[in-house]
């Protein structure tokens, strides 16, 4: 029996973490080796992932609830606080990622981290370098993930390599106008009217361990920020409950307007003034909404470094 190795992205899976698991498992299974690679996800897929999988006739990977005793390849994350349950009792065999490294392990393992716009950019380049065919649907999936992570190339995390790969994948997938297609994706991401407050918060939410404590930072990328005006009080109440229950130092929700290319923040913390200041903004009202902060679009490259500068020393 070939041994099974699961390839899995982070909790609250976004499109890139799902697409990276699917495309890396396919890549590995195309190569001659004794193992079977199984794409997996650490939770339910979000609405844009559903749309993209459906569009390209692909199935959602199986949900893996517990990693204990399993062989695991982590994609699109390396901080164990973001990984699925039981990861401490799993055998991690490899990491492929594009986030800051915060990982310690007792054994030598293969680590492939590049400061590129998405995990699927790294994977697309690996397919090209190894002359492995990228079929139409896989090309569409990986292109969609790069467009999602780079906010249709507008994010400061997007590099020239990402743009080059998007163009190649656009040809392979038969989607000629990738910008228009990207906007269609982001309109789907923005439609959260039917979501509960908790669903909005948890839709794209990550934990970060800083010296001051655990921060939970969620992000909503939208084409219309005003959709959230009426919900700010309810959202902050839910975040307060979450903070108490799960012992967060702070819970922050980032609302990013991808058209205006700015963000505003809802902050639940004893240090909300300090956090708003660290982000370059100020608190607007009692619900701790900041003013719009121009140019801030990336949690990874802007929000987390600005906060860790103050709270991780
Ligand atoms: Mn990613």
Image (cartoon, rainbow, N blue to C red):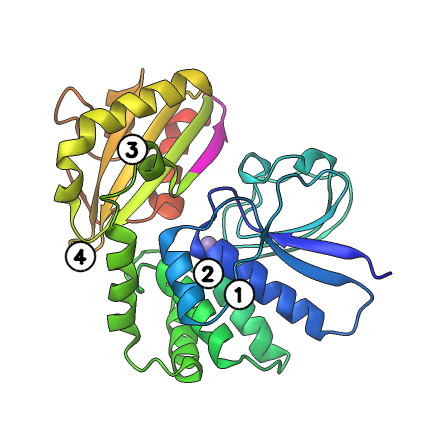
Residue 160 in view here: yes
The residue pinned by badge 3 equals: 197
Which of pointers 4 and 1 indicates the residue nearer the eye?
A: 4
Image-based side of 202 in relation to 139, left or right: left
Q: CA distance from mark 3 to mark 4?
A: 23 Å
Q: Which residues are magenta?
A: 206-212
Is 216 in the magenta?
Answer: no
Image-based side of 149 in relation to 183, left or right: right
The residue pinned by badge 4 equals: 259
User: Regarding mark 2 in the picture, which secondary structure is present there?
Assistant: loop
Asked if the residue under mark 1 is in contact with the one under mark 2, i.e. CB atoms within 8 Å, the reply is yes
Is 210 in the magenta?
Answer: yes
The secondary structure that dominates the magenta segment is strand
| Rendered location of residue 256, percent (x, y) | 24, 46
Q: The N terminus lies in which quarter of the figure?
A: bottom right
| Rendered location of residue 57, percent (x, y) | 47, 71
Q: CA distance from mark 2 to mark 1?
A: 7 Å
The residue pinned by badge 2 equals: 116
Q: Residues within 10 Å of mark 4 (few under 14, many from 20)?
A: some
Residue 290 in view here: no
Sequence-wise first label, 3 or 1: 1
Which of pointers 3 and 1 indicates the residue nearer the eye?
A: 3
């Amino acid at each position: 029996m070939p041994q099974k190795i699961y390839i899995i992205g982070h909790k609250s899976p976004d499109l890139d973490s799902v697409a990276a698991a699917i495309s890396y498992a396919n890549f590995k299974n195309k190569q001659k080796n004794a193992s079977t690679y199984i794409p997996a996800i650490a939770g339910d897929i979000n609405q844009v992932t559903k749309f993209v999988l459906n569009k390209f006739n692909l199935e959602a990977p199986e949900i893996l609830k517990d990693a204990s005793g399993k062989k695991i390849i982590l994609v699109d994350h390396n901080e164990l606080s973001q990984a699925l349950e039981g990861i401490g009792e799993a055998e991690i065999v490899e990491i492929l990622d594009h986030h800051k490294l915060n990982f310690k392990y007792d054994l030598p393992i293969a680590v492939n981290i590049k400061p590129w716009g998405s995990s699927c950019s790294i994977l697309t380049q690996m397919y090209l370098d190894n002359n492995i065919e990228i079929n139409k649907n896989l090309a569409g999936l990986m292109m969609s993930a790069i467009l999602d992570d780079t906010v249709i190339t507008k994010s400061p995390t997007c590099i020239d390599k990402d743009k080059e790969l998007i163009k190649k994948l656009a040809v392979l997938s038969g989607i000629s106008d990738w910008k228009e297609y990207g906007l269609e994706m982001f309109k789907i991401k923005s439609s959260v009217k039917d979501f509960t407050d908790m669903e909005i918060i948890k839709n794209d939410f990550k934990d970060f361990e800083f010296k001051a404590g655990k921060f939970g930072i969620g992000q909503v990328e939208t084409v219309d920020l005003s959709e959230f005006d009426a919900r700010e009080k309810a959202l902050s109440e839910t975040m307060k409950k979450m903070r108490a229950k799960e012992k967060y130092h702070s819970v922050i929700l980032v609302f990013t307007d991808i058209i205006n290319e700015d963000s505003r923040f809802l902050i639940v913390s004893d240090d909300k003034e300090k956090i708003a200041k660290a982000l370059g903004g100020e608190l607007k009202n009692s619900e701790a909404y900041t003013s719009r902060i121009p140019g801030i679009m990336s949690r990874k490259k802007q929000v987390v470094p600005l906060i860790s500068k103050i709270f991780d020393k």
